[in-house]
Amino acid sequence: MTTRVPLRELAVLFLRLGLTAFGGPAAHVALMEDEVVQRRKWLDSQRFLDMLGAANLIPGPSSSELAVFIGYETAGVLGLLVAGACFILPAALLSAALAAVYLRYGSLPRVAGVLYGIKPIIIGVVTQAIVALAPKALKTFALIAIALAAGLAAAFGFDMLAVLVVAGLVALAFARLGVRKDTNPPSPSFLLFAPLAAAPASVGLVALFVTFLKVGALVFGSGYVLLAFLREDLVTRLHWLTEAQLVDAVAVGQLTPGPVFTTATFIGYLLAGPLGALVATFAIFLPGFLLVAAIKPLVARVRSSPAASAFLDGVNAASFALMTVVAFQLGRASLIDVPTIALSVVSTVVLVKWRVNPTWLIAGGALIGAVAK
């Protein structure tokens, strides 16, 4: 089930998400699920999971591509452009502003207090989304087993794309062997458990575009995978940045709301000013828009094919497991004392029981953190 959505409503939602979606891809997915599935009923859970699985199978920033998928599904080609651009724009503008401050003053502003309060709320948001998506992602004993195996593989550092593909193939094998799809599994709730800036290099816009276009077309996974690609190209091969500048750039991607790939905006500004920021941002996100436009019509066909549907079920179960592993890893890093644990528990209960808009909880967490620190 899909609801046709006016472009203005789509733009307002994704601009707000772009301004408040802290916490990385898992948190972004959780916020989108809450807004478009639970609150607005634009999509049902199965359709949302299918898009999430498809976004995880193509290169580029998966949460931004999920936004593009949602826009395309609910408002056509214009919706694709509006949802994606509105989700990316706030983080890109903020990253460019931080780059200007960085070049002028030689360091990043201190935001530790704000993050101290926001991170526990994000854990609550992600946990609530995991609870909501579990019944659709883990429909059978076979899919629960696949999710557990995928989670273990992710925890031990196996390549994310390989985990997703293998999960899909295993689910397809189960289907071919005749494993019942109507088996009623038990509740899956047990799964819940600043350096100085050096002068930037002088870089041509064409070279900048080509470099970030390649990164956007090849990188799968998290901001840490992005860091490896950027280090290889920008520090080791091209010598455009120092190690310290690259670390600061990735930190900006983690500190700002919205997609982590707006690290490219910060780097582009350092290397070629405002126009460089625009070129780098456009280049790194362009492959995602093109890939979503190309494969989105295939997602519905995949569901109509028994074999392809079984494969997608396996991918969805693995995506759910990866999201759970990321939530656990975020929790270990974010829940560092009694106040942060209390914030996370309270936000989870409030979200699950009363369906409060997560934006207000995030704003409250930022305020509490700023005051506390």
Image (spheres, rainbow, N blue to C red):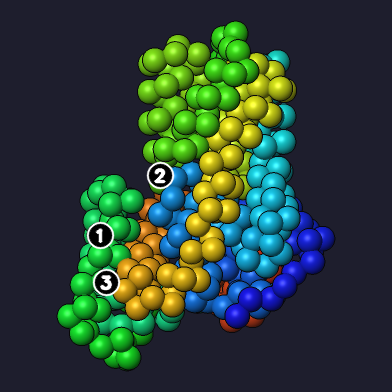
How crowded is the residue under tag 2: few (<14 C-alpha within 10 Å), some, or many (20+)? many
- Tell me the distance, in whole angstroms, between the alpha carbons under discs 1 and 3: 9 Å
Q: How far across and down, in percent of the image, does residue 274 sit?
A: 72, 23
Q: How far across and down, in percent of the image, does residue 74 sit?
A: 67, 67
Residue 154 image label: none
Tell me the kind of residue under disc 1: Val
- Tags 3 and 2 in contact by the CB under 8 Å rule? no
Q: Earlier in the sequence, mark 1 or mark 2?
A: 1
- Tell me the distance, in whole angstroms, between the alpha carbons under discs 3 and 2: 22 Å
Instruction: Describe the element under mark 1 as helix, strand or loop.
Output: helix
Q: Residue shown at 35%/78% (left/top)?
A: 306
Q: Nearer the viewer, residue 53 or 188?
A: 53
Disc 1 target residue: 166
The C terminus sits in image quarter: top right
Q: How far across and down, in percent of the image, does residue 64 sit?
A: 57, 50
Write down the quadrant of residue 272 in the picture.
Answer: top right
Q: Residue shown at 63%/46% (left/top)?
A: 257
Which residue in the rendered view is the most extreme toward the right? 8
Disc 3 target residue: 171
Q: State whether residue 360 is above or below residue 63.
A: below
Instruction: Describe the element under mark 2 as helix, strand or loop.
Output: loop
Q: Residue shown at 35%/70% (left/top)?
A: 308
Write down the quadrant of residue 313 in the picture.
Answer: bottom left
Q: Earlier in the sequence, mark 3 or mark 2?
A: 3
- Tell me the distance, in whole angstroms, between the alpha carbons under discs 1 and 2: 16 Å
Q: Residue shown at 63%/34% (left/top)?
A: 282
Disc 2 target residue: 220
The N terminus sits in image quarter: bottom right
